Each structure stands twice: as C-alpha cells, then as structure tokens.
Amino acid sequence: MIVQEKPLHVDVPVTLAEVKAVFSIASLSFEGDLPASVFHLQLIVNDVSRWKASHQVVAVFHTNAGHATLHDQAYNADRNIATGNPYRTLVTDLMEHGVQVELCGATAKAHGWGNEDIIPGIKINTDAMARTTQLVQQGFVKMSES
C-alpha cells in the first residue's frame, strides 16, 4: 500500500535552546501498539537532537507502569508469561539517546522487586512523588499521560 503524504502547514513552530522535562509514567496508554509515553519521549528526544538543544529528560516509571523497567526474566515471573519484556528495547533505546530512566522505589517495594530485577542502567529513586517534586522544584516541566 502506498501512502501519499498530505501537505501540513505548521502554524506554531517550536524550537527550544534548552529542555528540562520529567515524564511521570504511572500507566501505559497506547498509540496503536506503542505506549504513548514512549512515543512522546521519542518525539522530544528527536526534537532536542534536531534543535541541538541542551537537555535533561527524565522518565519516572511508577504504579502500573513499573513493570516496563524489569529485565526479561523478572518480567516473565511478574507477569506470569514467557515472552520477555516487550518494552525492554524501547526503554533501553531511550536510555541510549540520553533519557534518564528511573523506577519508583515505592513501586518496586510494593511488588517485591529488587535491583537485580531491573534493566541495567535504570536508577531507583525514593518514590515517584518525591522525585517528581524535586525535579519540578529544579525547573523541570512535568509531563503526565492519562
């Protein structure tokens, strides 16, 4: 199937010199088969690259989205499946593009997850609410999905 692109005029073009954003990800809402929060993180990563902007982007997974940070074996045990973590590559790709990915310590504790259950490179914070508050007080813009 050939898809022809239609012209699109952007009325409000945005270019930023600096981006400080924290994504609070409590659940996975989807754009088709892709978690919307991951899609939006990919957008901002691509934007800052194109703008050559200085940036700090933090993704805090918590509550019903914490499982996205588990390595394959822990994901299988937690979700009672044998397919591995379908979000692992998406999450590690974000990290490779400079996004700091964190897991809420309170979520990990509530689920009985330890550091050895988490994808390498993901940081554990005290809890998502305290961390998000800290980053907002440091000038980060909070992004939330519903």
Image (cartoon, helix red, strand yellow):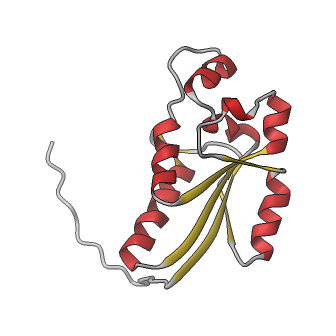
Q: Position of residue 26 (x, y in %)?
A: 71, 47
Q: Position of residue 97 (x, y in %)?
A: 45, 58
Name the residue rendered at 85%, 59% in the picture. 130
Name the residue rendered at 84%, 51% in the picture. 126
Occupied quadrant, residue 49:
bottom left
Name the residue rendered at 41%, 83% in the picture. 13
Q: Nearer the viewer, residue 83 or 144?
A: 83
Q: Is there any visible trace of residue 31 in the rendered image? A: no
Q: In screen coordinates, is 103 left or right of 14?
A: right
Q: Quadrant of the N terminus?
A: top left
Q: Nearer the viewer, residue 106 or 3?
A: 106
Q: Nearer the viewer, residue 125 or 129?
A: 125
Q: In screen coordinates, is 26 left or right of 87?
A: right
Q: Is there any visible trace of residue 9 in the rendered image? A: yes
Q: Position of residue 144 (x, y in %)?
A: 68, 59
Q: In screen coordinates, is 89 left or right of 79?
A: left
Name the residue rendered at 17%, 57% in the picture. 4
Q: Nearer the viewer, residue 12 or 117?
A: 117
Tell how many labels. Answer: 0
Position of 54 relative to 102 (above/below): below
